[in-house]
Image: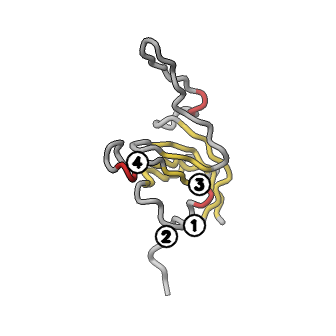
Amino acid sequence: RYRMVMDGLKQSLDDRVQVLTLEPWRNDGTHLLRLENIMEINDDPERNDPVTVNLNDLFAHWTVLEATEMVLGANAPRSEVERLKWTEIGSQAVPSVAPVPGLQITLKPMEIRTFLVKLKQS
């Protein structure tokens, strides 16, 4: 009669990805979400490719209305933070962050990405 367990995800994530954090952030439906690619760079050459996750297809009972990528501590939007760029003599700095089109995010091995997501129950 009663369902004591609820699956929060629409489908299983790739086994290289885990949800580190999902917690209410504000009273307006905003939640803190952290995703991690648990693979190490030299773990398995066949599985070291980046993994793409569509935030729209992540949750079973919520719709993601918007997402803002934050720094790991979630205290500033990632777009507002300028990181130091280290270069070797004779080389050029390579940007480490590519823009996120829509709600598709890509996680490289050992990468953790933090988002403030506005959720609406569906």
Secondary structure, mark 2, is loop
Asked whether the residues under the numbered discs 3 and 4 touch, taking CB atoms below 8 Å apart as contact, a structural biologist would say no
Secondary structure, mark 3, is helix
Task: Choose the circle earlier in sequence order: 3 or 4.
Answer: 4
Residue labelled with disc 4: 48
Task: Choose the circle earlier in sequence order: 3 or 1.
Answer: 3
Residue labelled with disc 3: 55
The alpha-carbon separation of the residues under discs 1 and 4 comes to 28 Å
The alpha-carbon separation of the residues under discs 2 and 3 comes to 16 Å
User: Is disc 1 surrounded by few (<14), some (14 to 19) or many (20+) residues within 10 Å?
Assistant: some
The alpha-carbon separation of the residues under discs 2 and 4 comes to 28 Å
Residue plotted at (48% across, 20% down): 84
Residue labelled with disc 1: 60
Task: Choose the circle earlier in sequence order: 2 or 1.
Answer: 2
Asked whether the residues under the numbered discs 2 and 1 touch, taking CB atoms below 8 Å apart as contact, a structural biologist would say yes
Q: How is the image coloured?
A: secondary structure
The type of residue carrying mark 4 is Asn
Quadrant location of residue 111?
top left
Q: Nearer the viewer, residue 78 or 37?
A: 37
Q: Is residue 57 visible?
A: yes
Instruction: Give the side of residue 2 with respect to residue 42, left or right.
Output: right
Residue labelled with disc 2: 7
Say which mark, if any, is on residue 11: none
What is the x, y in percent for residue 40?
34, 45
Secondary structure, mark 1, is loop
